[in-house]
Image (cartoon, rainbow, N blue to C red):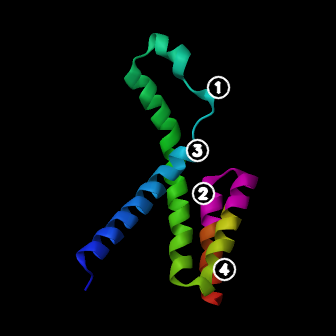
Amino acid sequence: MLSLKAALAYTIAIGLVVFLCRAFPFLFLRPKKQEDPGAERAKKDGALDIFLAIIERVVPPAAMTMLAFNSIAAPVKENPAGALPVLAASCFTMLVHFWKRNFLISILGGTALYMALGRLF
């Protein structure tokens, strides 16, 4: 049984890690200053429209980044020896997507490779 101090320390540490994981994509995937809809759009639109324009551009890549990190980290954490299928399929998915620029082909190809390698290892 944990003491109250240990439980509080663990809770704060886990909360900080979760917060940083949630903040990571927003900190590193910010739009460039030239792409910011700020000055020109502020003249004709309200502040809410500007905020929504920024959110609609930032949230999808942030969500995809979180999903990618989670899908790679969870299996690697459970079984470090079995990390090869996860890492190989992730790299394959990324390369196929950069090559073909087709979400369906890259996701299906990466999933098929992961399933095949998962049976072998």
Q: Amino acid at mark 3?
A: Leu
Q: Is residue 56 above or below residue 79?
A: above
Q: Amino acid at mark 2?
A: Leu
Give the magenta range.
Answer: 94-109
Q: Amino acid at mark 4?
A: Leu
Secondary element at tag 3: loop
At 55% from the left and 55% from the top, the residue drawn is 65
Quarter of the image for residue 36 reads top right
Q: CA distance from mark 4 to mark 3?
A: 27 Å
Majority secondary structure in the magenta region: helix
At 65% from the left and 60% from the top, the residue drawn is 106
At 57% from the left and 39% from the top, the residue drawn is 30
Circle nearer the N terminus (4, 3): 3
Q: Which x, y percent locates residue 98?
A: 72, 53
Quarter of the image for residue 31 reads top right
Report which residue position mark 1 lands on.
Answer: 34
Q: Choose mark 2 or mark 1, whichever is in front.
A: 1
Residue sitting at the far bottom: 120
Q: Which x, y percent locates residue 8?
A: 29, 69
Q: CA distance from mark 1 to mark 4?
A: 40 Å
Secondary element at tag 2: helix
Report which residue position mark 2 lands on.
Answer: 104
Q: Are marks 4 and 3 in contact (CB under 8 Å)?
A: no
Secondary element at tag 4: helix
Q: Are marks 1 and 3 in contact (CB under 8 Å)?
A: no
Q: Which x, y percent locates residue 78?
A: 50, 82
